Image (spheres, grey):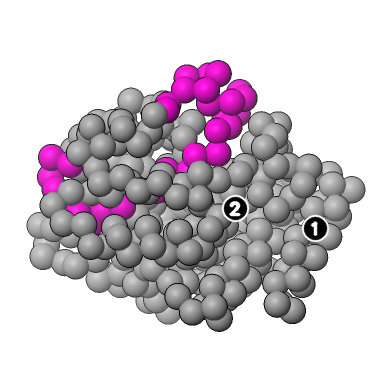
Amino acid sequence: MTEQEMKDLRLRAAKIRLGIIRGVFAAKSGHPGGSLGTAELLAYLYFREMNIDPLNPKDPNRDRFVLSKGHCAPALYAALAERGYFAESEMDSLRHIDSFLQGHPDMKGTPGVDMSTGSLGQGVSAACGMALAGKLDGKDYRVYALLGDGESEEGEVWEAAMFAAHKNLDNFTLIIDVNGLQIDGFTKDVCGPEPLDSKMAAFGFHVIEIDGHDLGEIDAAFKEARAVKGKPTAIIARTTKGRGVSFMENQAGWHGKAPNAEEFEIAMQELNKALENLEVQ
């Protein structure tokens, strides 16, 4: 990527973070911590990696994205709004009655959502089904799924991983968001999933490990994944839960609660300052 392209993606990620906090505050509920940690990954997917068209969200030849960690819907919605699937002002309706931005992604009601998710672990299976369908139909679209490290404690994840390798789904990329935290605390204390790299490799995946906030590493990883033939790819992305909001970073308590008015103002000040700094670079 050029420096200008890198800057553009950083700006997109910053705006996605603003959308996340805006939405969760308006809803008075939601999951800001894990959502904030995915901003760079989603910015890259929606603005560089995936073949998609907001004007034709059901294009049968489009790439597919499944947010297996469906509680991080605020991040997906903020990315979709930034990409032009709907107005950014819709983030104020998050989780409201009659809103198409539900607490978890709804493929029937929200433009750009490829799979309804929420029950943890199931999104990986759905993504594998999409990838296999593409193979059987002779399509060249690619499928991406974002999985949480706490979510990887679900047994269905490993059944799906075994299936993906068995079916040689080289059109499937699994992104594992490893922030080390889940609702009950540190993953290592709850039911530690590590070492994820050797486990994914043992299940037949090509494994790439990156800093999930470094857009240069993200770019290289997705390029590498595209070149892999005969097996699926797992990108293990190390991230910071609550990234960008100082009092939310690395705090399990911000897994699933909304900021109050004072906290909202502090968070928005920090995120707007970060955006302004990027704009003048």
**Does residue 173 appear to the left or right of 103 in the view shown?**
left
Identify which residue, 173 or 106, lies in the foreground: 173
- Residue at figure coordinates x 80%, y 58% from the top left: 270
- Magenta stretch encompasses residue 189: yes
Which amino acid lies under the numbered mark 1 shown in the image of this protein? Glu
**Does residue 168 appear to the left or right of 250 in the view shown?**
left
Of badges 1 and 2, nearer the viewer stands 1
The residue singled out by tag 2 in the image is 74
Mark number for residue 257?
A: none
Stretch in magenta: 165-194
Q: Tell me if label 1 and label 2 are in contact, CB under 8 Å.
A: no
Mark number for residue 270?
A: 1
Secondary structure category for the residue under label 2: helix
Which amino acid lies under the numbered mark 2 shown in the image of this protein? Pro
Q: Residues within 10 Å of mark 1 (few under 14, many from 20)?
A: some
Quadrant assignment for the N terminus: bottom left
Indicate the position of residue 136 as horizontal and vertical percent values. Answer: 10, 57
Quadrant assignment for the C terminus: bottom right
**Residue 39 quadrant:** bottom right
- Residue at figure coordinates x 42%, y 64% from the top left: 219
Identify which residue, 70 or 263, lies in the foreground: 263
Indicate the position of residue 25 as horizontal and vertical percent values. Answer: 75, 50
Observer able to see residue 61: yes
Residue 45, placed above or below residue 187: below
Secondary structure category for the residue under label 1: helix
**Does residue 33 appear to the left or right of 198 in the view shown?**
right
